[in-house]
Amino acid sequence: MRRRPGRAELGADHEDHVTGVGQPGQIGGRVQRSARSNRPTTISDCSFEPPAGAVLVQTPVTAPVHFVRCTFRGVDGAILRGAGPVRFTDCTVTGAENAAPISVGSADLRIDGGTYDNTGIELSGVRDQRITVTGGARFTGSNKAEALLGRAAGPGEATWDITGLASTATGSGTAHIRIADGTNHYAATGSRFVGGTLHLAPDALRSVLHTACVEDGTRRSAMPPAGDTVRTDGNLVL
């Protein structure tokens, strides 16, 4: 990778900005690896082929990390451990065959647009987390966990804010969204789900808003009943 001209000497109050083409295994070397710097890091227009289990963001990192128009190929179980905010804008992420989803420990993950094929996102649940999916993001295919968006068991409370997602699952057993563990607040509006399942386990959810969505051949394998904190009407089921 190469840095954008004129940005290499920025001070501590400025933003690190990396552009160019990355090499396999170099992601951790370019994204901040410690908490000593509070500078946000933006990585734009880069291409990566990370090895299986690659750590994209190290544990101590609390500063924001922003991937813009980056391409990730052959992703398998990549890890974002740091608690700091992470944002993907218009990125293309393609998983390896039978790949594990991307494990995310960030307290605030935002996916704005882009395409995600045969990969997925799994919140680690190690802390309270918020995931926002918006901007017409497209998820397709499946992965080893058979869940395009999901979470692991853990003490953290997760807030899901999904708007304008287009998700097409390969295979009847693949979940577009699987929430089966922990404590969660879930909202999905204006999204389209094709095939697969929606698995929203009642015991794992404190509040649910699932409305104005299209479910085309999608099976609700788990869904809480309507109530004071649950609204699942107003969808188009095909």
Image (cartoon, rainbow, N blue to C red):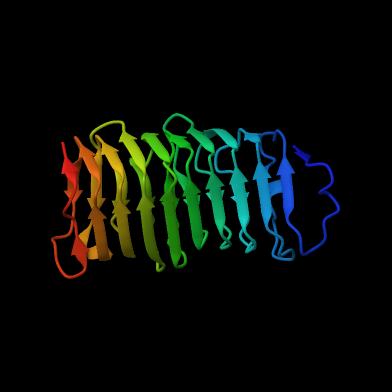
- On the image, the x and y values in percent for residue 237 come to 16, 41
- On the image, the x and y values in percent for residue 142 come to 36, 35
**Point 44% across, 67% down: residue:** 128
Number of residue marks: 0
Q: Quadrant of residue 230?
A: bottom left
Q: Would residue 204 be found to the left or right of residue 57 on screen?
A: left
Q: Residue furthest top?
A: 97
**Point 43% across, 41% down: residue:** 137
- On the image, the x and y values in percent for residue 31 come to 68, 50
Q: Quadrant of residue 64?
A: bottom right
Nearer-the-camera pick, 236 or 197: 236
> Is residue 143 among the parts visible in the rendering?
no
Q: Would residue 189 be found to the left or right of residue 48 on screen?
A: left
Nearer-the-camera pick, 225 or 13: 13
Give the quadrant of the C terminus.
Answer: top left
> Is residue 39 among the parts visible in the rendering?
yes
Give the quadrant of the N terminus.
Answer: top right
**Point 73% across, 44% down: residue:** 18
- On the image, the x and y values in percent for residue 26 come to 70, 40
Nearer-the-camera pick, 32 or 98: 32
**Is residue 96 positioned above or below 182 on the image?**
above
**Is residue 42 positioned above or below 49 on the image?**
below
**Point 31% across, 53% down: residue:** 188
